[in-house]
Amino acid sequence: MAQGVVAINPVTISPKTGISAALMVLALILLALGAVLSRAEAGAGLGVADWAAIRFTVLQAACSSVLSVLLAVPVARALARRRFVGRAALVTLLGAPFILPVIVAVLGLLTVFGRSGWLNSGLEALGLPAVSIYGFHGVVLAHVFFNMPLATRLLLQGWQSIPAERFRLCAQLRLTPRAMFRAVELPMLAQIVPGALALVFVICLTSFAVALTLGGGPRATTIELAIYQAFRFDFDLGRAALLSVVQLALAGGVALFALRFVPVITMGGGLDRVMPRWDARADVQRVMDALVIGFAAGFLLVPLAAVILRGVMGLPAMPATVYLAAGTSIAVALSSIIVLLALALPMAGWIAGRKGGGLEAVGLLGLAASPLMIGTGWFIVINPYADPFDFALPVTVLVNAMMALPFALRILVPPMRDAVETFGRLSAMLGVRGWALWRILLLPRLRRQIGFAAGLTGALSMGDLGVIALFADPDRVTLPLQMVRLMGAYQMDAAAGAALVLLVLSLGVFWMCDKGGRGRAEA
Amino acid sequence: MLKLEQALIVQDDFRLLADFTLEPARNYAVIGPSGAGKSTLLAAVCGFVPLASGRLLWDGRDITQDAPGARPMTMLFQDNNLFPHLDVLQNVGLGLRPDLRIGTAERDKVMEALARVGLADYTNAKPGNLSGGQQSRVALARVLVQARPLVLLDEPFAALGPALRNEMLDLLKDTIAQTGAAMVMVTHAPEDVRRIADEVIFVEGGQAQAPRPAAALMDDPPPELRAYLG
């Protein structure tokens, strides 16, 4: 409309399915919460160990997020202003840890930083004391490994959102690098950093697999791990329940608070643009940037290379159970993708049809509600009627889909809104609605984002080690769990082989979905 | 045919009142200053903007609450008239089947319409590969197959150059005349009015005035219209 006097509002996407999907997610969480609460003994209270777990959880999450973002700032800055061979590959690689199975990365970190790892071998050769990767700093190290690249990508987006004119203006005014940093870059950082900190903090709060493998013991147990131990070893449902409530309140509170800051997750388009800059031409700055980029690349690549090297050598040592577990994992991942799309697409349609964006909070519940709490809750719900272990895989599928939901909504809502704004009137005028609207307009327009969200979900699900650890029995094992068992039995070669298989499967499912979404690129 | 009965549009501090009747097979031009509500008037007739009060009557039947797709009319927008991911055949076929299940009978009709607008060879092309004029023709072909008795146009050829624009206007006029439909077109250009309109609806000061014969009005405009035309 030329004049734009009146907001045209063709309500074309029916909100019913979206609301039902959101209610289902809510019911899934609330039912689990209710079940957990019914077993939580109010009188028991939190013990010394529980308080220690809470303290540790918050402290490691704080340390991990601050370190991740702090380290990401120089890396993002260097990437934003330098052009070099392999830059595009490195930027793509920064997205990898997000879809990398935690347990695979842990194995890589162990190979490099572990007791008899590469680092300690080097230190020993130099006659220096060995460092230990277990405990607080091991957990933080692993979290930084995962989240520094994520933070770098978010910050890189920030840098590239600065209009080129600003830099030109600064060059014209001959601002010193310091003045330029204060005038241009600091305001951008002030916008992006809180969101990045909050996102990493929430992710680390609910960390389980890292704590399970690198933490443990009274001094390095997260709430999530404590829930697992209370449930699995002590079968103390009351305590597991109480801890679950603490976890939900803590992570839920932070997540709700963080929603306002968390930046939109893009597919990495446009990150390959390099800003022409005039302020960083001194040799010192060049060398610094090169060092920073080299360090970041090494920090990312060396553990990954370790996984691949060890994995190739370990492949022959793998027992047949690994292949069975791989089959299970593939089935779980594919089912998670289907469940996620069935939930996320209608929800995104509902949210996109509304003016405000606060509804995304529903999706965020998936991030805040601990998978182990949901697992525990559903164990309690199912237990009186059937053997909960029979439901291990379906519950895993549901929980995996919910974990991916907040990310999927962040990916799907903006293009959905865009499609409705651009083609909503045309569709309404032609009488295209209901299923036809999805088939003719929304699914084709969102193809890329759907592929990306599906790939993300598949990879997250493939590598997830959460609920399945609670429900595990010998018959129903996913590949990550099988890996943990092999590591627990000190069959490190076999575990390394399994890690390589898992790595290939995770990246493979992501690649195939993402590729499928890009497909015939047109229009 | 279509009666706007004390139709009032209110949004925030914007108000527009329309009270007149449109006759079949007539060509109406809607003119008026920017921001007067020309596009809004069309959007309300088509069902994209709700009426605060008043009614829309189609041959005596109240269609005020009908969904846009259910009204006996169709509309061409300024842009985004075609789905970029569908080919020409599908885009035109949507006018017949909103579920896109185009059978042989529908296909024949689509082909006939495409031939009428001179695009018979472009059935499988995507809009992105067509020129602006060709895209307009595809949209026109869809208007043809829809064969609704009223066609609304919101500056549909604003993005085209003058020569192409006149060509499209003539094609539009012919096409609409063939289907026997009435047409209401928002335009900024007085020469467009002379080219295609029988009657003019002047929108200004919160009111859409009743249609008046175009030729007489343009030759001897009243003061407020003279002020607008300059």
Image (tube, grey):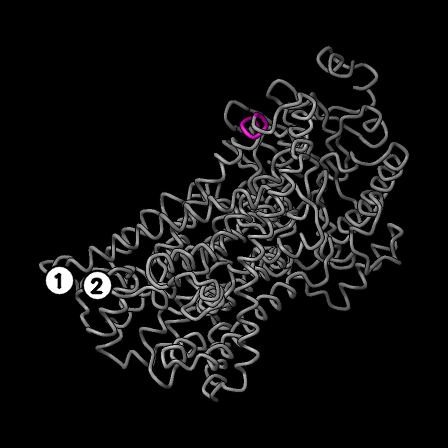
The image quadrant of residue A522 is bottom right
Which quarter of the rendering shows the N terminus of chain A? top right
Camera-side residue of A446 and A133:
A133
Where residue A88 appears, as percent x and y from the top left, is 67, 53
Which residues are drawn in magenta?
Answer: A179-183
Where residue B171 appears, as percent x and y from the top left, is 86, 42
Instruction: Indicate whether A398 appears above or below B201.
Output: below
Earlier residue among tags 1 and 2: 1
Q: Dot 2 surroundings within 10 Å: few (below 14), some, or many (20 or more)?
A: many
Query: The residue under label 2 is which amino acid type?
Result: Ala
Tell me the residue at 68%/35% (across/down): A281
Query: What residue would you read off at disc 1?
Result: A41
Query: What residue would you read off at disc 2?
Result: A241
Camera-side residue of B186 and A63:
A63
Q: Are marks 1 and 2 in contact (CB under 8 Å)?
A: yes
- Membership of A181 in magenta stretch: yes
